Image (cartoon, rainbow, N blue to C red):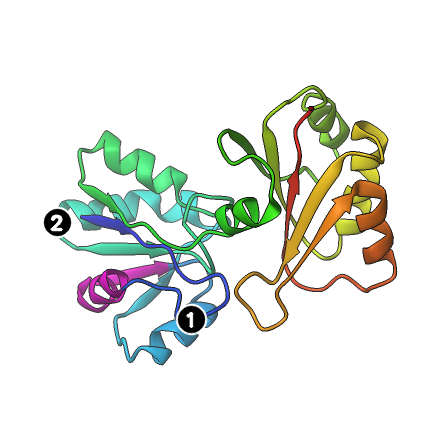
Amino acid sequence: MLYIIPTPIGNLKDITLRSLEILERVDLILAEDTRTSKKLLKHYDIATKLSSYHQYNEHKILDGLIDKLKTGVTLALISDAGTPSISDPGFLLVRECLKHKITIETLPGATALIPALVNSGFSCEKFVFEGFLPAKKGRLTRLKDLCNENKTIIFYESPHRIIKTLNDFIGVFGQERRVSVSRELTKLHEETKRGRLLDVLGYFNNKKPKGEFVIVLEGVR
């Protein structure tokens, strides 16, 4: 059996009791970065063995993991933060498990996009999740495809590209479009800046961007 387990995006208390129970009893935990995951497990005195599962090895070890699961080994998949498969590895393993009729259980839990969306003040009824934009090729094409989208749009972004992304947004969506930018969600320096794209860009131009960002863009009104 495979368990998909969300892990905290910052505050280590944001994990469910059920998640902790399962992490303690499975045979093996697949972790995106074992160094990061060890901190979480140590905090809760969980001694379950860890093994690396990330975008650079997921294709290579996939068959071996399926073989383990077929013999009755119980695995849990976690990412560094948030829910596996949401802008993180996991999709390939889930798809292969379904193909081989291996039972999968996905637990509810932490993910950055929902708190940022609710906190934005924009419509939560319908939304589009875009994740990370391409760094170069296809970036502007992808944005132009969203030009007439009337649903709220959510993006993930790194501190290294947030300024470029906001500039790109102004070029495609116009400087008056409203946006909500959240960073370091659930952490000590959590912050959300709301307003016109032009104003929010000006704010981060004057304040060095730090932490991981969630950008929530209002749809066409």
Picture quarter with the C terminus: top right
Position of residue 152 relative to residue 132, above or below, is above
Q: Amino acid at mark 2?
A: Thr
Residue ID at (42%, 47%): 58
**x and y percentages locating residue 82 in the rendered image:** 45, 55
The residue under label 1 is 12
Residue 22 in magenta stretch:
yes
Cα separation, mark 1 vs mark 2, equals: 33 Å
Task: Left or right? Give the position of 45 relative to 169.
Answer: left
- The first of marks 1 and 2 along the sequence is 1
Viewer-closest of 23 and 121: 121
Q: Residues within 10 Å of mark 2 (few under 14, many from 20)?
A: few
Taking the image as shown, residue 114 lies to the left or right of residue 201, namely left
Q: Is residue 46 left or right of residue 12?
A: left
Q: Of helix, strand and loop, which one carries label 1?
A: loop
Q: Residue at x 45, y 50 (%)?
A: 57
**Magenta span main SS:** helix
Vertical placement of residue 2 versus 81, above or below: above
Residue 159 occupies quadrant: bottom right
Look at the image and say whether residue 39 sits in the magenta stretch.
no
Position in image of residue 54 (x %, y %): 46, 53
- Residue range in magenta is 17-30
- Given this view, does label 1 or label 2 mark the residue nearer the observer? 1
Other residues around mark 1 within 10 Å, as few (<14) / some (14–19) / many (≥20) = some
Label 2 sits on a secondary structure element that is: loop
Q: What's under tag 1, amino acid-wise?
A: Leu
State the image coordinates of residue 210 (x, y, percent, origin top left): 71, 64
Outermost residue on the left side: it is 72
Q: Looking at the rendered structure, which numbered label has been put on residue 71?
A: 2
Who's the residue at 85% across and 43% down the image? 198
Residue 134: give its label: none
